[in-house]
Every structure is written in C-alpha cells, then in structure tokens.
C-alpha cells in the first residue's frame, strides 16, 4: 500500500505533466478529484474560482499573493480562451501596455468580446476581468503575446483615447518609438477615415522626434483629401528624442522613466557632501558596519541569521558539518554575503580613488553575484554553470504586482542601465535609480535585493555619502516604496525612504 508521501508524489507528477505543457491555469478536468484534493490540501494548488486553479508553493503564507501574480497572465489567457474561444481581445489600452513591455498586473483587466456581459469576474487579491461587449479588431489588426490576443501595435495606437497620452506617457512613447515607418498606421487611418486621430498621432510622433513619420501621416491623409489638424497630445515635450526606431520598448521605458524620475530625486534626496573624503576613515566605517549590514540585508531576504553566526563566518570558525553552527542554508547565505562584501569593499575603494561608479558597477557586479553563491556551489546545492550570468528563466517578486522583464529583455536592459549610471552626473540619482532600476530588472534568479543594496552603497561612495544600512524593521516600508516605483512610477516614496535611512547612517557615524 502506498504511503502518504508516495501518494503526494504521484499527484505532483500529474501536476508536473500539466505544467510541462505550459499551463499556468489548471481546470478541474485536468486532474482527477483525488489528485486535486491532495494538492490543495498540501498547498501545491490554489483555487482561483470554482473549477479553476493555479500552481502554488506550500511554503507561502495563507493569503499571500505571489502565486497568483506569477500566474495572472497565463491564467487569463487560458480562462478567456476557454470561455470565449478566440472571440476576445484585450482592450487597446491594455494591448499597448503589453507592447510597451509593461506586464504589471492590473487591478482590472479590460477585455473586448461580442459575447461580453459588461460585468466583472472577480479574481483573487482585488483583481478582476471586465468583459466589455464590443467589436474585435479588424482582420490583420490583432496580434498574440504570450497567449493573449491583443490589438496589433499600430491598431492599438489608433484606438487608444487622448487621455492615454497624458496618463501613461512613458508607455505610449515607448510604443511610438518602436514604429519603423508610417505605412501600417497610415493604412488604418485612411481605411477608417480617422482624420482627428491622424492629427493626434502626427503630433505624438513629432513630440518624440520622429519628424519623418509625422510628416508622412499628414501627407498621406492630405493626398486622400482629408483635412488634418496636428495636435500634440502629450502634456510636455519628450525628455528624450528618438530619431530612429528603438527595437526594445523595455530600454526605451527605462530611459524615459530615468529622466522623468530625476526631478523628484534631486528635489528630495540630500545633496552630496562637499568635504574631501578621508578614504581610510571611510573604509574603516564600511568594515565596522559589516555585521549590522549583513544581519539586516540577509534578514530582509528571509534568512534567519544571528550576529554570532556572522562573526563565526567572518572569523573562519564556522563548520558547515557542525550542527551547532545552525541551519545550513542560513550559514551558506552568511558565508556568501561575507565573501561578496569583501569584493564590494574593493569596488567602493576604486570609486573613492576616482574610478567611474558606473564602469565599476558594470565590471564588478557579476563578481558580487558569484561570491554570494559560491558557497552553495561548493556545497553541491548549485551547479557552477548557475553562476555564469544573467537569468535564463522568468522570475517573480514575492507579493508584487510588478512582473520583471522577460529573460531576453534583460540582455538589452543591463548594458543600457550601466550606460545611464555612467552618464548620470547627480550622485543622488545614481544612488536611488541605481538601486531601483537594478531590482526592477531583476537580472538574476536570486540575490537581486542584496546586490541592489551593494550597488546602492557603491553609488553612495561615488557621492561621498556614508555606507547605508536598510534595516529589517523597515522592510514593509521598503518593499511598499519599491512597489510604488515599479507599478505606479512614483519614485518619491523610495527616495524619501532612502534619505531617511541615510540620515540614520550619518547620525551613527
């Protein structure tokens, strides 16, 4: 007779077979009742609504949103296709967000379908789907992104209302910058007789520096005897001009966000100290703060470490085979943090001696990552190849509505990110956006928070600010501030949070 563990293993195999087929949504009929109930009981499934489930992790606390946010888009694609077959499409506005690489989970997902009931379907954690009874895109004006039927990029630009250009300027500009020429957009405008929209789009393209496309739209409409009045729908000029097509909307959005967030940071964060830096004294302070920094940074990530364990690791008296030295996972994390901290200190010293902070972080951040996880390789938990570079799989942030960019986008984003650090003249902006943009991209499978805080402190050194510890007591405020910046593009709470922690660092010097 099979043991309970063997029975659970059978159910997990059944779930694994479904997931290997690419499913993020599990229907009742996909699993036998026995498997389904066993997986629910043990926390490997989470019910979304009657008859629909998503995979979950048993170590998640009750009511935690991570499994849902991680499965949201895949679930919606499967659920909508099951309910409406192919007779549905995301709204033009939501389509544009996805074309722009903005995969943040919306509070309410608007869906067009001829069979719509004009009412919401409630989903977990305050999210919902609202199916609007409306027409679908015309032939050739739809696209599919990760199983989601969307308006094509040109069709979405034609269909969105004028309010989008003001309320979501970064996303709209990112999509406009992807357009190669006016032909696809012009054909939709001409076929629909959209003279007002043509004037709006001509003004929008001119706003971002795409003069040729703007003129092409106006000339094309004029040749068909349409009278068009050009109107700039944005509230202000673009902070960046795009003379040529930008292939990656992720990079465009990052560059635009960087420029739009600068003013709040400059106005809020304390100015960099003007006094000359005593490098020896600065480095002694960094060394002195190590135990406190390691304890708090590891605790923020959920590791349970004591100052005694950290001291043992630093002194080289920790024995991973000695049960008195505590839980292996926590000790490996502490050892990795110590090793990484030594390399980060070298990076700080380089910057204090005049090296460019952006160059230093670009070259050294991969070393910090390798040192963080080398003990796990030595212990056989990770393979050496796991330390080779940026992630090759999706990654999700616990309880966050922000979905980090796809692995392909990471390769485009990271060189541009370090270029922005190199080009940035204001140290406060390097501090705040260096940390925020790094964790927004989330380039590694693990360790992004710790590396983000290392990077923040290297940027602190570039402005003469002291090494700053973010304490575990402020974790909730810290994560909420990052969420505001990631999902709502509001950098001010995060800037204020770091400034407050900087003041604490100054007081304790």
Image: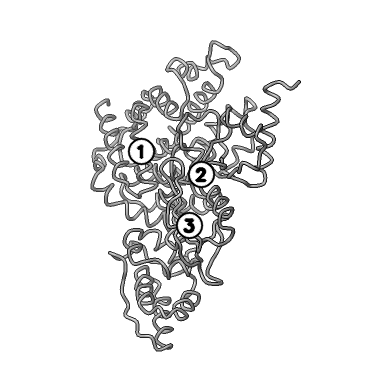
Above or below residue 191? Residue 329 is above
Residue at image position (57%, 38%) is: 55
Disc nearest the viewer among 1 and 2: 1
Could you give the CA–CA distance between mark 3 and mark 2, rounded to whole angstroms? Answer: 20 Å
**What is the quadrant of residue 376 in the picture?**
top right
Of labels 3 and 2, earlier in sequence is 3
Q: What element carries label 1?
A: helix
Residue at image position (25%, 39%) is: 273
Using the rendered image of the protein, determine whether residue 418 is visible from the camera's viewpoint.
Answer: no
What residue would you read off at disc 1? Answer: 480
Above or below residue 344? Residue 156 is below
Could you give the CA–CA distance between mark 1 and mark 3, rounded to whole angstroms? Answer: 24 Å
Above or below residue 378? Residue 73 is below
Could you give the CA–CA distance between mark 1 and mark 2, rounded to whole angstroms? Answer: 20 Å
Frontmost residue, 219 versus 151: 151
Using the rendered image of the protein, determine whether residue 109 is visible from the camera's viewpoint.
Answer: yes
Of labels 1 and 3, earlier in sequence is 3
What residue would you read off at disc 2? Answer: 443
Q: Where in the figure is residue 87, as x and y percent of width and height?
A: 55, 62
Disc 3 crowd rating (10 Å Cα; few below 14, some 14-19, many 20+) is many
Of labels 1 and 2, earlier in sequence is 2
Q: Where in the figure is residue 213, as x and y percent of width and height?
A: 43, 76
Q: Which mark is residue 373?
A: none
Q: Is mark 2 on a helix, strand or loop?
A: loop
What residue would you read off at disc 3? Answer: 98
Q: What element carries label 3?
A: helix
Residue at image position (48%, 28%) is: 337
Q: Where in the figure is residue 375, as x and y percent of width and height?
A: 58, 27
């Amino acid at each position: 007779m099979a043991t309970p563990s063997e029975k659970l293993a059978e159910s997990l195999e059944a779930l694994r077979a479904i997931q290997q087929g690419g499913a993020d949504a599990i229907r009742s009929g996909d699993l036998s009742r026995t498997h389904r109930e066993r997986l629910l009981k043990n926390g490997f499934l989470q019910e979304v609504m009657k008859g629909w489930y998503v995979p979950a992790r048993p170590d998640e606390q009750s009511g935690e949103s991570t499994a849902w946010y991680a499965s949201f888009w895949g679930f919606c694609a499967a659920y909508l296709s099951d309910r409406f077959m192919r007779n549905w499409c995301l709204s033009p506005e939501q389509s544009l967000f996805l074309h722009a690489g903005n995969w943040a989970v919306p509070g309410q997902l608007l869906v067009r379908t001829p069979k719509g009931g004009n009412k919401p379907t409630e989903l977990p954690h305050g999210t919902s789907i609202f199916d609007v009874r409306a027409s679908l895109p015309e032939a050739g004006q739809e696209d599919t992104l990760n199983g989601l039927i969307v308006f094509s990029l040109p069709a979405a630009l034609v269909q969105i209302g004028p309010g989008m250009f003001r309320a979501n300027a970064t996303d709209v500009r990112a999509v406009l910058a992807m357009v190669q020429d006016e032909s696809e957009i012009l054909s939709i405008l001409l076929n629909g007789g959209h003279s007002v929209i043509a004037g709006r789009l001509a003004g929008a393209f001119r706003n971002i520096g795409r003069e040729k496309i703007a003129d092409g739209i106006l000339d094309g409409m004029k040749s068909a005897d349409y009278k068009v009045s050009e109107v700039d729908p944005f509230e202000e000029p673009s902070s960046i001009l795009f003379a040529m097509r930008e292939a990656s909307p992720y990079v465009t959005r990052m560059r635009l966000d960087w420029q739009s967030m600068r003013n709040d940071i400059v106005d809020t964060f304390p100015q960099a100290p003007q006094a000359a830096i005593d490098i020896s004294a600065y480095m002694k302070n960094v060394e002195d703060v190590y135990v406190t920094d390691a304890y708090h940074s590891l605790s923020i990530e959920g590791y349970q470490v004591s100052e005694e364990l950290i001291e043992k690791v630093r002194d080289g008296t920790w024995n991973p085979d000695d049960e008195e030295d505590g839980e292996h996972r926590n000790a490996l994390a502490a050892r990795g943090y110590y090793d990484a901290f030594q390399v980060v200190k070298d990076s700080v010293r380089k910057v204090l001696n005049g090296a460019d902070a952006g160059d230093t972080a670009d070259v050294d951040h991969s070393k910090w990552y390798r040192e963080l996880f080398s003990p796990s390789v030595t212990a056989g938990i990770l393979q050496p190849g796991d330390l080779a570079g940026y992630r090759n799989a999706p990654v999700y942030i616990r309880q966050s509505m922000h979905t980090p960019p796809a692995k392909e986008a990471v390769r485009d984003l990271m060189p541009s990110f370090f270029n922005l650090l190199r080009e940035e003249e204001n140290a406060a902006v390097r501090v705040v956006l260096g940390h925020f943009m790094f964790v927004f991209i989330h380039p590694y499978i693990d360790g992004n928070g710790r590396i983000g805080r290392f990077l923040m402190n290297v940027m602190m050194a570039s402005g003469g600010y002291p090494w700053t510890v973010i304490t575990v007591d402020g974790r909730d405020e810290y994560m909420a501030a990052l969420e505001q910046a990631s999902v709502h593009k509001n950098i001010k709470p995060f800037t204020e949070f770091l400034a407050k922690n900087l003041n604490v660092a100054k007081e304790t010097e």
